[in-house]
């Protein structure tokens, strides 16, 4: 059994050689043998560019074959992969790239009207920060010639980069790959923290493969499956439960750059998609799309969802109207990736109301006010279900946070339990139900949003004295942000001013959708803002509006 990602790549080429590994809409169709050859070429190009084992290579680009080849090639060269959120603004991306110490960056060229290399250059100039030594631009879509020429300064095109492979013999790259051990660092995935500063969760090769293998096993993924990957590759769901899960099973990856319901419906029919994971809102959009009935979606067999409340009615509709044989829910976080998952055969109520039972070697325990209610391997509690913080332990808990021993010690206790910050309980079968969050994080369209980060941005807006951000229900996205703002005396701000300021500095899913101005915020005796009261007010207003 392969225990490093390069070994898994070589094993996939040997076992599934002629099977289509990648079928990119509008792009190439590559077999597993071709993916190995092209990823090895990327590794050779990186070696020729001076990348050494252990160096970090960042990727800031949407779901294309370049991302897959860039990631696998980086790992093949012995480097550590640093995925960067494509929704980040220039300053947000620069922060992650700089703190990771990335020596190379693979970045999308012009895409959706954004020139990321120019954004990075501006952010670096404003922050007086350096950029990676090697910046390779990935051709995602045709660029405006003027923009392309301005962005080209100090960068290397993908064609120029891959041409460097000629300077390094293939056996040199193979030796690099063979020297990697299962405990070597494979990737650093950054996630926002409640302090507003992102933290880099580090995983070893064995861990990344183990969680991918566990996900693939629960999903019963095989080489006959065709997997529409709409989850971003920069996210553990798209990367580890997507790319790596396919690598281990020989399934075909069909990546979508940006989710579009109409295009997804067309791809399900034309590519005979069988596996289609995503956030609940994705399935709702597909179900309600006017063109759905005109397409043959009968190839669908498996959906895996989570990251938000999943109504029982949605599970039933997915099975009845989208032809899914199996609908599963799962629970994970960047620090553990896949912790629990439902199993094929679970009824709709179990799928909708729980996040499944332990997987990937995890133990689950619930920490109650009386102390941890210790579970046993597999997650079965010793007595009746008790609600409390969800704690996880096992071989696939992250190695720690990058350059942050204090945050690591706070997250992982001396007994090895990862404190998730989520609240839930286990039933008599060992199935986990998540009931609340200890922290203020909310989920917008499947993406975690941490209010402290948004509040820190609002604090820099001239005229804002203080703010509090909460998540409020939204029919399409699950939750969206609502900002309560107290203005400084003598300053006059409008909702449009606040939203425009946020859009310039935050990824779109972090930008509040509503702003309410207050003369003061509710506080407890110690001066802490009582967000519980703000949520209660928002809930009561929403209930009143629905009754009218």
Image: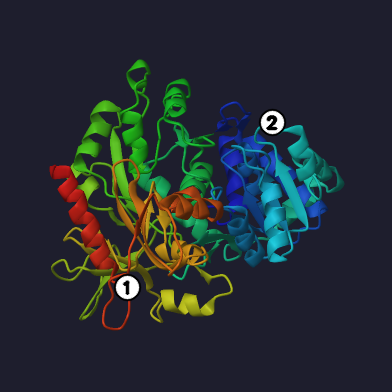
Picture layout, residue 297 above or below residue 45: above
Residue 132 in picture, x, y percent from top left: 74, 58
Residue 312 in picture, x, y percent from top left: 20, 42
- Binning the other alpha carbons within 10 Å of mark 2 as few (below 14), some (14 to 19) or many (20 upward) gives few
Q: Quadrant of residue 257?
A: top right
User: From this viewpoint, is residue 433 visible?
Assistant: no
Residue 516 in picture, x, y percent from top left: 34, 57
Residue 205 in picture, x, y percent from top left: 56, 59
Residue bearing mark 2: 142
Picture layout, residue 166 above or below residue 323: below
Q: Quadrant of residue 528?
A: bottom left
Dot 2 falls on a residue whose secondary structure is loop
Identify which residue is drawn at 62% across, 31% down: 30
Left or right? Give the position of 523 relative to 165: left
Please tell me which residue lies in front, 455 or 316. Answer: 455
How many numbered marks appear?
2
Left or right? Give the position of 115 relative to 471: right
Residue bearing mark 1: 529
Task: Give the quarter of the figure containing the C terminus.
Answer: top left
User: From this viewpoint, is residue 280 visible?
Assistant: yes
Q: Are marks 1 and 2 in contact (CB under 8 Å)?
A: no
């Amino acid at each position: 059994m392969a225990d490093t990602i390069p070994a898994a790549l070589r094993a996939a080429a040997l076992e599934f050689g002629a099977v289509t590994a990648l079928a990119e809409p509008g792009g190439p169709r590559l077999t597993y043998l071709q993916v190995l050859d092209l990823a090895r070429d990327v590794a050779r190009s990186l070696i020729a560019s001076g990348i050494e084992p252990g160096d970090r290579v960042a990727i800031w680009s949407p779901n294309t074959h370049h991302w897959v080849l860039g990631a696998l090639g980086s790992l093949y060269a012995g480097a550590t992969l640093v995925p960067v959120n494509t929704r980040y603004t220039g300053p947000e991306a620069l922060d992650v790239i700089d703190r990771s110490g990335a020596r190379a960056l693979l970045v999308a060229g012009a895409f959706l009207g954004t020139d990321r290399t120019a954004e990075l250059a501006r952010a670096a100039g404003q922050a007086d920060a350096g950029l990676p030594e090697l910046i390779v631009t990935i051709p995602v879509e045709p660029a405006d010639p003027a923009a392309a020429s301005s962005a080209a300064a100090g960068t290397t095109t993908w064609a120029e980069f891959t041409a460097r492979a000629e300077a390094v013999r293939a056996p040199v790259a193979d030796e690099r790959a063979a020297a990697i051990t299962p405990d070597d660092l494979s990737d650093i995935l950054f996630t926002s923290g409640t302090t507003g500063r992102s933290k880099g969760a580090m995983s070893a090769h064995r861990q990344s493969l183990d969680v991918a293998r566990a996900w693939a096993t629960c999903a019963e993924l095989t080489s006959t499956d065709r997997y529409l990957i709409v989850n971003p590759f920069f996210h553990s769901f798209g990367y580890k439960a997507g790319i790596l899960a396919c690598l281990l099973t020989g399934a075909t990856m069909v990546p979508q750059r940006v989710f579009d319901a109409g295009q997804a419906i067309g791809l399900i029919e034309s590519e005979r998609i069988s596996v289609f994971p995503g956030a609940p809102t994705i399935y709702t959009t597909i179900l309600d799309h006017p063109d759905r009935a005109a397409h043959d979606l009968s190839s669908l067999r498996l959906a895996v969802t989570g990251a938000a409340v999943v109504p029982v009615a949605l599970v039933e509709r997915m099975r009845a109207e989208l032809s899914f044989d199996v609908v599963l829910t799962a629970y994970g976080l960047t620090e553990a990736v896949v912790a629990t998952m439902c199993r094929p055969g679970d009824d709709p109520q179990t799928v909708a109301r729980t996040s499944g039972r332990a997987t990937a070697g995890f133990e689950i325990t619930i920490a109650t006010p009386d102390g941890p209610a210790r579970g046993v391997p597999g997650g079965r509690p010793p007595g009746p279900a008790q609600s409390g913080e969800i704690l996880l332990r096992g071989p696939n808990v992250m190695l720690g946070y990058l350059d942050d021993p204090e945050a690591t010690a706070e997250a992982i206790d001396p007994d090895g339990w990862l404190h998730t910050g989520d609240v839930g309980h286990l039933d008599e079968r060992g199935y986990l139900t998540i009931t609340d969050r200890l922290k203020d994080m909310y989920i917008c369209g499947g993406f975690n949003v941490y209010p402290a980060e948004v509040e820190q941005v609002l604090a820099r807006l001239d005229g804002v004295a203080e703010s509090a951000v909460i998540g409020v229900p939204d029919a399409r996205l699950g939750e969206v942000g609502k900002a309560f703002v107290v203005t400084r005396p003598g300053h006059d701000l409008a909702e449009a001013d606040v939203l425009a300021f946020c859009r310039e500095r935050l990824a779109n899913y972090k930008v509040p959708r509503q702003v309410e101005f207050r003369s003061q915020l509710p506080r407890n005796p110690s001066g802490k803002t009582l967000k519980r009261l703000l949520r209660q007010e928002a809930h009561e207003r929403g209930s009143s509006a629905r009754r009218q």
